[in-house]
Image (cartoon, rainbow, N blue to C red):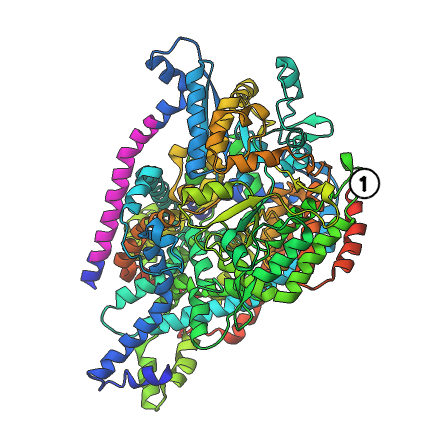
């Protein structure tokens, strides 16, 4: 008993000692923080020209190498002028950024994706840029129109696009050759033929090689497929629902047929077995014949030294409608200024710098993304982007579209996802799904 | 299972019989340890092993540099220090304030005794989602977001410490009332009784609460995520996210960092477990 | 004021200040929000009972209640049973006991993000630990995290794996059962199993009650693991955080989505209050029933 108590006491002693250590060191760390928190003092110390530099805080969702690439641009900006000091911060969670902006403790400038624009505009998270653009006579004609429009809601521009993302078709040359194809599929019919011929099934029905772009997910596939086939969900300006068209229906039917033939369970097994762009990704292990994905896949394959012999082609068009060739759905990563920003001018200055040709090209080529401005696309840095000579020409297709924004966009996307999922799982037929969607989706446009 | 354990404990068991529980515990612990083992094995894989096709479980050539890389890519030491600092401050805060209120609802005979205890239990039932947003707004108004205050100060006021108050109170209830009574008759003040009689007797439960609390704050994610706005102040649980990029996960580094993140608390548990279990036992948690 | 009252208040004052600032005020505020349309940017406007009406009419809320009850009803008892069995095992006197205890406890302290990633491997339908093991037995395992039927059992397995915290408390209580009870039972010729049911269980029934309530509270508020897994599994942009066919849409997940994705603080506050009431009622009912199955030894 006594020995036990002794041990307990010694544990307590350890705790006390740790505490003492903490308290003595605590003041030191406080000083350190203070030093870094006042940019003016550091500026004067380093002998820069006099005058207060005002702080601009930029939060971003990227981590690792991508975050470092942005930090590099931030450093370049800070060195390029002496009015502002940009401080970058990698924040792994978008909700935190929103809450912080709402509470007035957030960043001045931050990033997201274009589909949040209607929501952020209505919630009052993002600041309209029109006044700043007008004041400085900033030229937005350099941006790819479809990408620029993705920042517009209710006739105001809330964000600028970094990149123009759309799916392209990657195909595994060896798997296609083994099945007797020397060329990638060009039409919907050819696509399905290739998919059927290249899919290899094990004895228990599980899929060894998947011929269809069902991986990474059918939700992702559906949007690419439908737009590749020339569908548009909405009319210009989101006035009318044009979802029910032959292209959409063909995309739905094709996924439904493939899932019926090879079994939902088997496809899910394959999807769950490999994580996207991970060592277990079936395209990277040579077990997927056709893949729809963004141009970053090329960069990833090169960076990771992955041994896969692939080709790149535009998405297949709907059989019999060659005029829709080169179609696709464009989406963008965006930067927007927070409504509660305390340094709007500084944020805008940095934004303009970031979007100038050289920094944007530097940033985007590293991420394997197509920049959203023509001048950045023409930069020499973009030549370093992996497969740029095949990917760049695809950006010129007139059939690339983006979904026009409207107030209830997020509800629309949610419902679309839910109903389609039931169809992918064969719990509803394409016809049933279409009739439900037609009725309900139209409601969101009112 | 029952046959294996049944043969053991007969008292006469020797040799093989003594070996049976070991076999059993080891076999069963494999289930628990396998995932952890995978974590450790992944943490020393090279790119080549990670991307091996078909996948390999054991790295052909262990790459210990992954651990060094962690230090290179995030401020691992700084973040460890921050995590430690916040955790220890919370432990101190709760250990100062919680026994006080636990005492007030166990050995002080006053009107509020049961009311306070009911409030403590009430906080246990309260989903944190109820208070999260208004609390955030308060800290915003106080201009303290981005500092450690929102993470540390509540501990000194026992906020969110209902469970620990409960454990302490249950422990105090097991102490003989006569001890306190006789001290009172001798004219000792409540404060003196608390400091000179109660506290010395409560070392085991205080150690237990300290360890439990340390474990909880060490891996807290939501609090630091909400309130820290400067990479210098980040804790480890936030820092780990640097290894999850938009397009892929840096498995080997994430696992190496996780291993180092978990190690201190494993060591703490290993050495403290006896006292720890003893402490819980003494509370005789009884409804 | 009486001296004792003053002392009581003084001793409770840190807690009371904390309670007022970090519990009472926020509760009050969120109660007010629950009757308003509020999004943190625009000032709240009064909408009466609309938010509560929404809670009871929205079919996603009902779906989330069903999912949450599934976890409460299955995960709570399963993790308690696993925790108790582990504690029973670890209570055996063997050499290296503290190593075993640590091994079993580790899973409950690994950071959540690492746990999630590790379990994505364990549950991988092709190369994962479980399905590989099942494969040796000639069984094709399910698609765990992508099959709406198996998503919640996956989470229950994860919960059982991390039952170390529950185990520790049970272990302490097992060591507290008086040896004399077992000894006299042995004289009566009771076997292992009978001793467990007629002595161990009744003796630790107060702890079971305590763990049961803590477990219920945990699973009513179930969030972190579901949230992480739902956002990691579907590789595409999965903004709904609901898992396959909404099978991981738990009450707290939906609440989080309403609050921080859609910024409908009124909805979220009303949901939080409904949850608070449900938890309180269930806890009360369990307390009421406890005198039928909980025995307080000796005294």
Q: Is residue A27 above or below residue C78?
A: above
Compare residues A193 and C203 and report the one nearer the observer: A193
Q: Is residue C45 visible?
A: yes
Chain letter of mark 1 equals A
- Quadrant position of residue A103: top right
- Asked whether residue C204 is drawn in magenta, I would say no
What's the residue at 54%, 39% (across, down)?
Answer: A94
Most extreme residue toward the bottom, as rendered? C189
Q: Position of residue A379 (x, y in %)?
A: 51, 24
User: From the viewer's perspective, is residue A171 above or below residue A74?
Assistant: below
Q: SS class of the residue under badge 1?
A: loop
- The correct choice, above or below, for A289 with respect to C286 in the image is above
Q: At x 65% / y 57%, what residue is drawn?
A: A192
Q: Residue A121: image x %, image y %?
A: 67, 32
What residue sits right under mark 1 in the picture?
A240
Q: How many numbered marks appear?
A: 1
Q: Quadrant of residue C46?
A: top right
Residue C292 lies, in percent from the top left, at 53, 75
Q: Is residue A17 left or right of residue A360?
A: left
Circle 1 crowding by C-alpha within 10 Å: few under 14, some 14–19, many from 20? few
Q: In the image, which residues are magenta?
A: A7-32
Q: Is A19 included in the stretch rendered in magenta?
A: yes
* Relative depth, front residue between A281 and A77: A281
Does any portion of residue B280 appear in the rendered image? no
In the image shown, does A415 or B179 lie closer to the viewer? A415
């Amino acid at each position: 008993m006594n020995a036990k108590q002794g041990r307990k006491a010694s544990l307590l002693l350890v705790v006390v000692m740790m505490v003492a250590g903490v308290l003595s060191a605590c003041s030191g760390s406080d000083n350190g923080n203070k030093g870094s928190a006042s940019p003016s003092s550091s500026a004067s110390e380093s002998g820069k020209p006099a005058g207060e530099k005002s702080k601009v805080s930029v939060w971003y969702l990227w981590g690792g190498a991508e975050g470092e690439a942005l930090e590099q641009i931030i450093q370049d900006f800070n060195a390029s002028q002496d009015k502002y000091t940009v401080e970058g911060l990698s924040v792994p969670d978008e909700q935190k950024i929103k809450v912080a902006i709402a509470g007035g403790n957030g960043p001045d400038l931050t990033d997201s994706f274009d589909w949040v624009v209607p929501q952020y505009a209505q919630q009052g998270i993002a600041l309209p840029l029109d006044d700043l653009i007008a004041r400085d006579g900033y030229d937005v004609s350099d941006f790819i129109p479809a990408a620029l429009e993705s920042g517009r809601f209710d006739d105001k521009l809330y964000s600028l696009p970094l990149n123009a993302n759309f799916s392209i078709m990657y195909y595994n040359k060896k798997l296609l050759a083994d099945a007797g194809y020397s060329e990638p599929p060009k039409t919907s019919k050819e696509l399905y033929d290739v998919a059927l011929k290249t899919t290899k099934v094990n004895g228990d029905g599980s899929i060894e090689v998947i011929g269809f772009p069902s991986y990474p997910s059918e939700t992702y596939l559906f949007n690419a497929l439908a737009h590749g086939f020339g569908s548009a969900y909405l009319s210009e300006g989101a006035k009318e629902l044009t979802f029910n068209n032959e292209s959409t229906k063909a995309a739905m039917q094709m996924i439904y047929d493939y899932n019926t033939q090879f079994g939902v369970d088997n496809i899910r097994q394959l999807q769950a077995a490999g994580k996207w762009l991970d060592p277990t990704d079936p395209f990277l292990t040579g077990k997927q014949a056709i893949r729809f994905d963004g141009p970053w896949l090329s960069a990833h394959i090169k960076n990771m030294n992955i041994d896969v012999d692939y080709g790149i082609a535009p998405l297949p068009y709907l059989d019999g409608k060659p005029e829709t060739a080169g179609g696709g759905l464009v989406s963008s990563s965006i930067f927007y200024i927070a409504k509660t920003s305390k340094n709007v001018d500084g944020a805008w200055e940095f934004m303009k710098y970031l979007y100038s040709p050289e920094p944007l090209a530097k940033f985007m080529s590293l991420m394997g993304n197509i920049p959203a401005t023509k001048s950045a696309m023409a930069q020499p840095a973009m030549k370093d982007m992996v497969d740029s000579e095949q990917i760049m020409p695809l950006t010129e297709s007139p059939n690339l579209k983006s979904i026009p924004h409207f107030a209830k966009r997020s509800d629309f996307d949610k419902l679309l996802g839910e109903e389609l999922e039931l169809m992918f799982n064969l719990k509803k037929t394409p016809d049933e799904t279409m009739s439900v969607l037609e009725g309900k989706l139209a409601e969101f446009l009112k | 299972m029952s046959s294996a354990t049944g043969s053991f404990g007969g008292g006469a068991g020797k040799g093989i019989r003594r070996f049976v529980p070991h076999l059993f515990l080891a076999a069963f612990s494999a289930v628990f340890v396998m995932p952890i083992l995978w974590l450790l094995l992944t943490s020393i894989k090279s790119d080549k092993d990670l991307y091996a096709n078909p996948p390999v479980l054991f790295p052909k050539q262990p790459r210990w540099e992954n651990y060094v890389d962690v230090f290179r890519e995030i401020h691992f030491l700084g973040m460890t220090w921050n995590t430690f600092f916040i955790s220890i401050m919370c432990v101190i805060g709760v250990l100062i304030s919680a026994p006080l209120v636990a005492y007030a609802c166990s050995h002080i005979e006053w009107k509020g005794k049961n009311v306070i205890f009911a409030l403590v239990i009430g906080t246990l039932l309260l989903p944190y989602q109820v208070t999260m947003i208004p609390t955030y707004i308060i800290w915003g108004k106080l201009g303290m977001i981005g500092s450690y205050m929102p993470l540390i100060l509540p501990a000194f006021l026992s906020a969110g410490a209902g469970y620990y108050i409960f454990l302490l109170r249950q422990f105090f209830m097991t102490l003989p009332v006569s001890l306190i009574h006789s001290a009172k008759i001798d004219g000792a003040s409540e404060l003196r009784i608390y400091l000179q009689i109660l506290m010395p007797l409560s070392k085991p439960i205080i150690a237990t609460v300290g360890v439990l609390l340390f474990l909880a704050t060490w891996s807290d994610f939501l609090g630091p995520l909400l309130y820290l706005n400067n990479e210098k102040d980040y804790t480890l649980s936030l820092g780990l996210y640097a290894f999850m990029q938009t397009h892929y996960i840096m498995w080997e580094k994430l696992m190496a960092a996780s291993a180092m993140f978990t190690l201190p608390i494993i060591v703490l548990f290993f050495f403290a477990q006896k006292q720890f279990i003893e402490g819980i036992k003494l509370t005789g948690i009884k409804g | 004021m009486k001296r004792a009252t003053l002392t009581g208040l003084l001793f409770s004052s840190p807690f009371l200040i904390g309670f007022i600032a970090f519990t009472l005020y926020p509760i009050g505020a969120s109660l007010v929000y629950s009757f308003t349309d509020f999004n943190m940017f625009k000032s709240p406007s009064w909408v009466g009972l609309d938010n509560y009406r929404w809670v009871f009419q929205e079919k996603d809320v009902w779906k989330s209640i069903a999912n949450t009850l599934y976890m409460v009803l299955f995960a709570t008892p399963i993790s308690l049973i696993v925790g108790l069995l582990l504690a029973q095992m670890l209570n055996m006197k063997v050499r290296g006991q503290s190593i075993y205890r640590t091994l079993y406890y580790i899973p409950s302290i690994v950071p959540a993000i690492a746990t999630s990633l590790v379990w994505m491997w364990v549950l991988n339908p092709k190369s994962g630990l479980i399905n590989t093991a099942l494969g040796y037995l000639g069984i094709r395992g399910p698609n765990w995290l992508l099959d709406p039927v198996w998503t919640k059992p996956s989470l229950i397995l994860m919960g059982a794996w991390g039952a170390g915290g529950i185990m520790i408390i049970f272990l302490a209580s097992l060591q507290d059962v008086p040896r004399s009870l077992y000894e006299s039972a042995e004289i009566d010729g009771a076997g292992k199993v009978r001793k467990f049911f007629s002595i161990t269980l009744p003796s630790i029934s107060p702890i079971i009650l305590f763990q049961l309530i803590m477990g219920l509270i945990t699973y009513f508020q179930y969030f972190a693991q579901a949230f992480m897994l739902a956002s990691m599994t579907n590789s595409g942009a999965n903004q709904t955080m609901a898992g396959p066919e909404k099978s991981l849409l738990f009450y707290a997940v939906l609440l989080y989505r309403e609050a921080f994705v859609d910024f409908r603080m009124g909805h979220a506050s009303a949901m939080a209050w409904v949850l608070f009431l449900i938890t309180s009622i269930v806890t009360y009912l369990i307390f009421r029933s406890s005198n039928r199955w909980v025995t307080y030894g000796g005294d």
